[in-house]
Image (cartoon, rainbow, N blue to C red):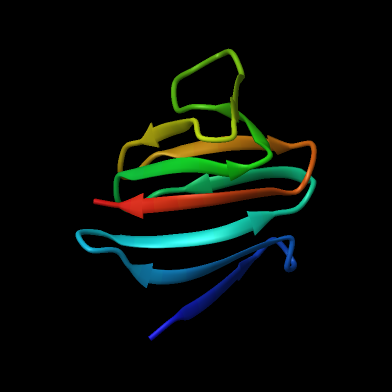
Amino acid sequence: MLTVNEYFDGKVKSIAFKTATLPATVGVMCTGEYTFGTSQKETITIVSGQLNVKLPGATDWQCFRDGEKFVVDANKSFDLKVEKDTAYLCTYE
């Protein structure tokens, strides 16, 4: 069964599902700035677009584009700047 999640007044939407090995979400983020918290380790892969990310403990922003990924450990928060609508895949461990 698919579960639809919505955040930040509908500007971020995702659909939860189970891959062959891990739970995951696939979704789209509209232009904006967001802070997310994690309860599990997350691996986020950019499907289309780009995310500017400030990872936990970092002072600099990093840009991730189509096909690139980044990892955020459990119980951390990270900041995003989305300059154009961006699709992503997130797996949880």
Image coordinates of residue 39 in percent, x first then y, are 34, 53
Residue extending furthest toward the top: 60
Classify the position of the N terminus by image quarter.
bottom left
Q: What residue appears at the point 51 percent right and 35 percent down from the top-left corner?
A: 67
Left/right of residue 42 with respect to residue 20 in the rendered view: right
Q: Is residue 55 above or below residue 26?
A: above
Image coordinates of residue 79 in percent, x first then y, are 59, 35
Closer to the camera in the image, 89 or 36? 89
Image coordinates of residue 84 in percent, x first then y, are 79, 41
Q: Quadrant of residue 2?
A: bottom left
Q: What residue appears at the point 45 percent right and 42 percent down from the top-left corner?
A: 44
Q: Is residue 11 above or below residue 73?
A: below
Residue extending furthest toward the bottom: 1
Count of numbered tags: 0
Image coordinates of residue 24 in percent, x first then y, are 37, 60
Q: What residue appears at the point 75 percent right and 67 percent down from the top-left corner?
A: 9
Q: What residue appears at the point 38 percent right and 71 percent down from the top-left corner?
A: 17
Left/right of residue 29 with respect to residue 68 in the rendered view: right
Q: Is residue 42 above or below residue 27?
A: above
Closer to the camera in the image, 45 or 55? 45
Residue extending furthest toward the left: 21
Left/right of residue 81 with respect to residue 31 in the rendered view: left
